[in-house]
Image: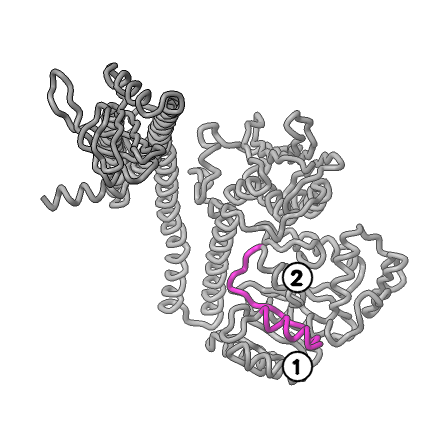
């Protein structure tokens, strides 16, 4: 896998083994990692700033995860936060996001899922607000949100509304891995795990429309993780 | 002896005894006040009458004295003294020597003080001889220094008062006796039944879950209490049985994938030689653990929904949007599987609940249909899966009916209820993927929305119906 830029990540997790596993994986992926083992240390480090993303466990000694995030937001710290929770229940996600978290991942999780999510979060934190972007351009593929049109190498591609949103999400995160759950959450707004491969079928249909008649595929499957849309010309 | 004291102490502490003691005291006080008031009033009336009689006599005698002086007075007194009555008369000199009258032995000091007195005097009557009687008298100093005493015998009166007082005391004694014994009997009876209930509940707590409280059949408060407790015990027993069933199932259904996981790891450790083989074994292990996690999540979610803790998710929404979205999500998948998803969705299906959970329920149902209703390989035209969402008028409030019908093998009627339970998998589905939690979750979601999940015969195939109350 290829990553756009190295990030500085703060892990606030009291389970030392889990924190070490996370830190190791993130460092191998080329990122800088700080680790705090309780809520107060974590808060101090986070408030000092300099991180691109925080990974916060919900249940922490001294200061619990949600209070920590709430306090940070009150202090005006806007760094993107991914909440990890062993609770993983239907309404816990709602509570986590309400407290000021940006994304929520129930434990146990696949590392690839976590990595994909924090890369997306970090990009969102650094980039300009999404609402302002009206036009995405990746190589010869262009998506215009205002006219709701998509062209590849000047040739118009006709998409269903949901396919349009799927492609938009992939293009917004071009060059980044997006997982099936991320697509289900962001394109369909569902947070459950269907037993059948619904997302794969939708992506393959979209791929049929976007890549048909072209030599190189833009929508690629990343094994064991999800999908990535990128400019094949820059790959070569 | 201590046993008696013990049970007596227990009796004293019973509510029935306390209540009867309380009423007893109130009753006694009422009797005391009523009787006391009546006697006091009667006494006062008699006294008043007596005083006015004496006044009248004195007035009469004073007239005699004015008219005829001392002589006339003495004569008049002599006459009155002879007539048998309760009146007392006496005229003495200043020194106290009697001149006329029907009373003896009145002390000179008393005669020295004019006004009203209560005295004891000796009465001489023919048959009974000398008797000491009580009397109310009035002393009057006549001009010239002689003393006049006029009075009424109050012995009868006093005796009457004594009788009333005795009756008073006795009636209070009887009230306390009957009240006490009555209260004791009521308390004893009550205590006996409560004691029996306590013994039964103790034995139930000790583990005899089948035990029930005895019902006397009188339909009183204790019977009603026993009846409610019995119903509660029945429910608890049911829940306990259900829980035992579920934990047995959990133990079994979680052990199976855990064992598989362990075997895979063990296998890889002994057999795998190349990095590729090791990688494959690890990937298999991760997949097994993902399955386990899925089972855990589903179980926790069902438990959470059944506990009713999903307040944060509940809101008013239009189920038509949800059903349309799910249909659109699955359309392509069903098509890939060689079938068609036909959706007929009415508009304006207002529900109170969670669109996300409803979507999950529908997704589970469609997943099931895909799993079990795959078309035969040689079928020319596959029968479609039908998804119908409708609003049905009902006097008790409209219902939202969302049904999914497939043309699969269906579920035999006798299994339709059972299959909604946790970890229930029918024999011919054992070799397909799944854990037997999908329908339980759908049923739990339906319950959270105040409705039900019903499985019906689609001849052929299965119809799963979500019957939910529409939001007002």
Q: Which mark is residue B91?
A: none
Task: Give the vertical position of A47 relative to A153 (above or below).
Answer: below
Q: Are marks 1 and 2 in contact (CB under 8 Å)?
A: no
- Quadrant containing the N terminus of chain A is bottom right
Extreme residue toward the left, this view: B1
Secondary structure state at the residue bearing disc 1: loop
Q: Where residue A119 appears, x then y in whole percent?
A: 67, 73
Q: Is residue A30 above or below residue B308?
A: below
- The disc numbered 2 marks a residue on which chain? A
Q: Which residues are magenta?
A: A66-90
Which residue corresponds to the image point at 50% horizontal and 46% vertical from the top-left? B306
Q: Is residue B379 magenta?
A: no
- Name the N-terminal-most of marks 1 and 2: 1
- Residue A230 position, x and y percent, is 75, 69
- Quadrant of residue B58 within the rendered picture: top left
Camera-near label (1 vs 2) is 1
> Pointer 2: what residue?
A182
Instruction: Report if residue B178 is visible in the image.
Output: no
Task: Name the residue located 72 percent from the left edge and 34 percent from the top edge.
Answer: B344
Is residue A94 found left or right of B306 in the rendered image?
right
Q: Which residue is mark 1?
A: A51
């Amino acid at each position: 896998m290829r990553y756009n830029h190295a990030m500085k990540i703060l892990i606030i997790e009291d389970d030392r083994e889990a924190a070490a596993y996370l830190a190791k994986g993130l460092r191998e992926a080329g990122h800088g990692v700080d680790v705090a083992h309780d809520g107060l240390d974590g808060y101090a480090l986070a408030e000092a700033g300099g991180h691109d993303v925080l990974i916060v466990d919900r249940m922490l000694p001294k200061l619990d995860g949600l209070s920590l995030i709430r306090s940070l937001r009150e202090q005006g710290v806007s760094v993107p936060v991914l909440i990890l929770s062993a609770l993983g229940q239907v309404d816990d996600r709602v509570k986590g996001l309400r407290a000021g978290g940006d994304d929520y991942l129930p434990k146990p999780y696949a590392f690839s899922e976590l990595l994909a999510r924090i890369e997306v979060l970090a990009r969102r934190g650094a980039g300009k607000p999404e609402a302002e972007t009206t036009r995405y351009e990746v190589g010869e593929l262009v998506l215009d949100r205002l006219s709701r049109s998509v062209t590849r190498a000047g040739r118009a591609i006709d998409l269903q509304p949901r396919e349009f949103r799927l492609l938009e999400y992939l293009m917004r995160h071009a060059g980044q891995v997006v997982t099936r759950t991320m697509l289900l959450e962001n394109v369909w707004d569902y947070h459950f795990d269907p037993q059948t491969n619904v997302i794969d079928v939708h992506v393959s249909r979209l791929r049929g429309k976007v890549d048909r008649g072209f030599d190189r595929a833009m929508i690629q499957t990343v094994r064991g993780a999800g999908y990535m849309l990128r400019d094949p010309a820059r790959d070569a | 002896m201590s046993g008696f004291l013990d049970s007596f102490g227990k009796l004293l502490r019973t509510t029935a005894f306390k209540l009867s003691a309380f009423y007893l005291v109130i009753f006694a006080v009422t009797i005391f006040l009523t009787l006391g008031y009546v006697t006091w009033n009667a006494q006062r009336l008699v006294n008043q009458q007596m005083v006015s009689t004496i006044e009248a006599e004195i007035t009469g005698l004073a007239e005699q004295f004015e008219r005829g002086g001392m002589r006339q007075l003495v004569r008049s007194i002599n006459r009155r003294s002879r007539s048998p009555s309760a009146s007392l008369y006496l005229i003495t000199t200043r020194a106290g020597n009697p001149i006329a009258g029907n009373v003896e032995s009145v002390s000179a000091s008393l005669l020295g003080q004019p006004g009203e007195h209560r005295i004891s005097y000796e009465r001489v009557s023919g048959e009974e001889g000398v008797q000491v009687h009580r009397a109310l008298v009035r002393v009057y100093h006549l001009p010239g220094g002689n003393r006049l005493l006029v009075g009424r015998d109050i012995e009868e009166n006093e005796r009457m008062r004594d009788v009333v007082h005795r009756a008073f005391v006795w009636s209070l004694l009887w009230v306390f006796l009957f009240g006490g014994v009555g209260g004791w009997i009521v308390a004893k009876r009550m205590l006996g039944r409560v004691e029996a209930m306590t013994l039964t509940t103790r034995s139930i707590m000790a583990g005899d879950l089948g035990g029930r409280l005895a019902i006397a059949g009188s339909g009183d408060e204790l019977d009603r209490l026993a009846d409610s407790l019995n119903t509660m015990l029945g429910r608890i027993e049911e829940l306990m049985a259900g829980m035992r069933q579920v934990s047995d199932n959990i133990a079994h259904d979680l052990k199976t994938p855990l064992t598989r996981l362990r075997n895979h790891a063990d296998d890889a450790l002994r057999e795998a030689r190349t990095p590729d083989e090791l990688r494959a074994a690890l990937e298999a292990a991760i997949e097994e653990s993902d399955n386990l996690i899925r089972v855990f999540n589903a179980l926790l979610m069902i438990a959470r929904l059944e506990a009713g803790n999903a307040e944060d998710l509940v809101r008013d929404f239009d189920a038509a949007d949800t059903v349309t979205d799910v249909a659109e999500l699955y359309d392509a998948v069903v098509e890939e599987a060689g079938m068609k998803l036909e959706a007929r969705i009415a508009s304006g299906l207002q529900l109170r609940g969670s669109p996300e959970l409803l979507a999950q329920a529908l997704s589970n149902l469609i997943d099931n249909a895909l799993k079990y209703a795959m078309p035969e390989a040689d079928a020319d035209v596959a029968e479609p899966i039908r998804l119908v969402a409708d609003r049905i008028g009902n006097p008790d409030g409209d219902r939202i009916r969302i049904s999914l019908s497939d043309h699969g093998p269906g579920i035999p009627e006798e299994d339709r209820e059972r299959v909604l339970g946790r970890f229930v998998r029918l024999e011919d589905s054992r070799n397909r993927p799944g854990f037997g939690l999908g329908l339980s979750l759908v049923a739990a979601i339906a319950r959270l929305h105040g409705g039900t999940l019903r499985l019906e015969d689609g001849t052929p195939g299965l119809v799963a119906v979500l019957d939910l109350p529409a939001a007002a």
